[in-house]
Amino acid sequence: MFLGRLEARRQIEFLLRTEAAAKTFGTVFGVDKIAHGDTVNDVLCAVDPAQVQEVVASMTETLIRNKTLYAQRLFGTYYRIAIDGTGTVTYRTRHCAHCLTRTHNDKTTYYHNVLEAKLVTPNGFAFSIMSEFIENADPEASKQDCELKAFYRLAPRLKERFPKLPLVLLLDGLFAGGPVFEICRDNAWKFIVNLKDECLPSVNEEFYTLCELSPGDRLTVSTGANETTRQHLRWSNDIDYVDTKKKPHTLSVFECRETKPAKNDQVKTTTFRWVSNFTVKATNVWALANQGGRLRWKIENEGFNTQKTGGYGLEHAYTQDVQGMKVYYFILQIACIIQQLIDKGSLLRKAFPKGFGSAKNLARRLLEDWRNQPISPEHYRSLSQSKIQIRFDTS
């Protein structure tokens, strides 16, 4: 359903349950027919979401253990974990006791959110590694659940599941605060957090002061087509910060001011700034900015946007069951991992060197092949027993 980008469970009946598909399904799984969408729902709503979450984590762990992603580590050491929240399902009336609520002009919206941790890479991979659902455990509580609270729950789970994995967390400005810095320090994680002007005013003020006192801590790099994009980088280390709980932190701040040509012979200037626990130097500031901080957007583009607008139907209510909603969410993440491995795999490029034009076109081809081209048991055994090597695009 997800790999075929059907966007609705009812489409199983109309698009998946063909005679040819049933033969392939029987060959692979040893069953007589494909289940009806309602039967699928009955089964999935009875599954423990934690078990399916473990499947997702294990798939990404397998890629790590097999060194598939070694070339994609920051400084050859750190796996980049982008963490951000997104909405999944929205209702006009209360769906369940765990719904989050938002009221505007006397109109209340009920919705469900999730905090997602994805392993992101420069070549475009965005693999789910762990999720934490944002939900009101106590409907009578005075404050709703939020991304920060979800992060405080997700962090110990992430450390327990991957205790020795060297990580750098890529976070937005919401997480720029003492509690997050302390969690990263205690877990031996690196972090790169987007730093806005209104966040950590004392840190921003000291950064500007130190930049004036240390004009040598600057670097200008020309990139892009014909090197028309210029990046002006500056940084400061050993910035002292005391949080609201009187706990001290030593931080670094680095900034990238980028200018590039725009329409009508204009020049567009964009400024990015981050706070981190890396020691910033001229030899690593460009990588920290471009292969670290700016890669956080991968969770938005290759992650949430693809799953919402690319045919996966992330915001579609596949079920009304609270636990079942989580199971469907995790299965969607599994499908996205598989799809990314197909898209960037050498087997696809070798078989179809001209490509398909878009990921949706590939999904359509997969769906039609499933519907109309049955695989015989002999062919399937031949495929299963053949030795192959798959390489991934690292550009």
Image: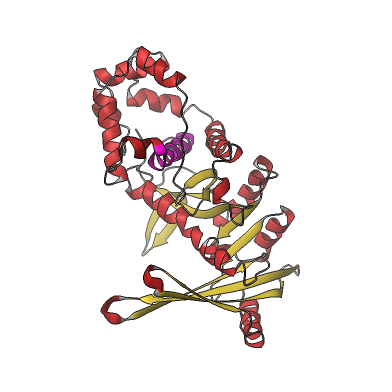
| Front position in the image: 15 or 120 | 120
In the picture shown, does residue 52 fall above or below 228? above
- The N terminus sits in image quarter: top left
* Number of on-image labels: 0
For residue 330, side relative to residue 376 (left or right):
right
- Quarter location, residue 277: bottom right
Residue 347 vertical placement versus 225 (above, below) = above
Residue beneath the point at 35% across and 20% down: 35
Q: Residue furthest right?
A: 247
Residue 146 seen in this snapshot: no
Relative to the observer, which residue lies in front, 351 or 280?
351
Residue 138 image point, x, y percent: 57, 47
Give the image quarter of residue 255.
bottom right
Counting from the top left corner in percent of width and height, residue 52 is at 52, 33
The verdict on residue 334 being magenta is yes
Q: Position of residue 40 (x, y in %)?
A: 39, 25
- Given residues 147 and 258, the one toward you in this image is 258
Q: Is residue 79 visible?
A: yes
Provide the major secondary structure of the magenta segment. helix
Q: Residue at x 35, y 40 (%)?
A: 349
Q: How is the image coloured?
A: secondary structure
Residue depicted at x 49% and y 35%: 323
Give the residues in magenta.
Answer: 320-346
Q: Position of residue 27 (x, y in %)?
A: 37, 15
* Camera-side residue of 147 and 166: 166
Q: Is residue 182 left or right of residue 147?
A: right
Does the magenta portion include 206?
no
